Amino acid sequence: MTIEKPTVAVLGGGSFGTAIANIIAVNGNPTFLWMRDEERAEQAQVVRENANYLPGHKLDDNLTITADLEGVIKACDVVFISVPSKSFRDVTRRLAPLLHDGAIVVSTTKGIEPGSFNLMSQVLEQELDNVKVGVLSGPNFAKEIIQQHLTGSVIASDDPEVVKTVQDILCSSSFRVYSNTDKYGVELAGALKNIYAIVSGLAVTLGCGQNTQAMLLTRSLAEMGRFAQVMGADPMTFLGLAGVGDLILTCSSDLSRNYRVGAAVGRGKTLEEATAELGQVAEGVNTVRTVKQKADELDVYMPLVTGLYGLLFEDSNLEEVIKGLMLGEQNTDVEYSNKTADGK
């Protein structure tokens, strides 16, 4: 049974966490936004604005911003976690003794845990008992969400209650939430597309034309699906909002942090300079390391990942990387058509 107006917490005071929390509050749900920094939380609560990440956007009066994690979690039925992947397990462990049985916990983090190659839903399942887990992902820029631009997202879970609850608390005239049972595929798509956003930002800054950009987008999708199938996800998931939708968005706009990192590298910045200039976490930088290692281990052909890894971490020559991409293996265009699957 879903609760008619559940009390909701969003953990993470960045742009996306703030935008999601505000939507939920606008929809009439008692909502808390948790920030680590007590001073920032107090300021945001008083001025009704997250000045660090979404300046100029007034937060709904139904949203309470606080640094009191224990007080927030004990009052909540649904918890969204919107923190960087490097902090995700630590925050989850802090939650464990505070959650009540049957609580719904939803990850919005688009990253992969280094070393373990765990996705965030797997971290939740490892660290939490007696909760229901979901994943929210899609082509969702926080700035446009809070401005109420028409936006679609995906809630992935094998529990119908999780799907129904998240749809009820998030859906509005400007924000639609679609369902998917392939939790792993939806989450993997959200993490992988960050890599290709860096590639796209780099390509555009270097003056590549529309032909090149179209090729990069479609070959990125092919790499994502190829890798997903080997990892046990459904490659067809990548044809939806969480896959190709998010890929198109992040590979075509400088609102994407990962795109901006690629663009800065294309202008001659070092990776360290590019990330420092950004001032926020770009998950794709860590994801390209992690995926390159896993692709090598599983012998998955991912030339764009390999080329970007060489540029960012091995001081590879750009011209040689591009030459290698163009002279590499020419795979089939659509790798998961019925004919391909049947071997005909």
Image: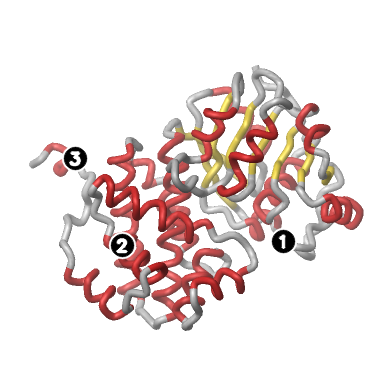
Q: Which residue is mark 1?
A: 53
Determine whether 150 is above or below 156 in the image.
below
- Residue type pointed to by label 2: Thr
Q: Residues within 10 Å of mark 2 (few under 14, many from 20)?
A: some
Q: Are marks 3 and 2 in contact (CB under 8 Å)?
A: no
Image x and y of residue 52, in percent:
75, 63
Q: Which residue is mark 2?
A: 306
Image x and y of residue 76, in percent:
75, 29
> In terms of secondary structure, where does tag 1 sit?
loop
Instruction: Mark 1 or mark 2: name the one nearer the start of the chain.
Output: 1
249 or 101: nearer the eye? 101
Mark 1 or 3: the one toward you: 1
Determine whether, in the image, residue 46 is placed left or right of residue 19: right
Q: Which residue is mark 3?
A: 338
Determine whether, in the image, residue 288 is placed left or right of residue 84: left
> In terms of secondary structure, where does tag 3 sit?
helix
Image x and y of residue 251, in percent:
45, 64
Q: Residues within 10 Å of mark 3 (few under 14, many from 20)?
A: few
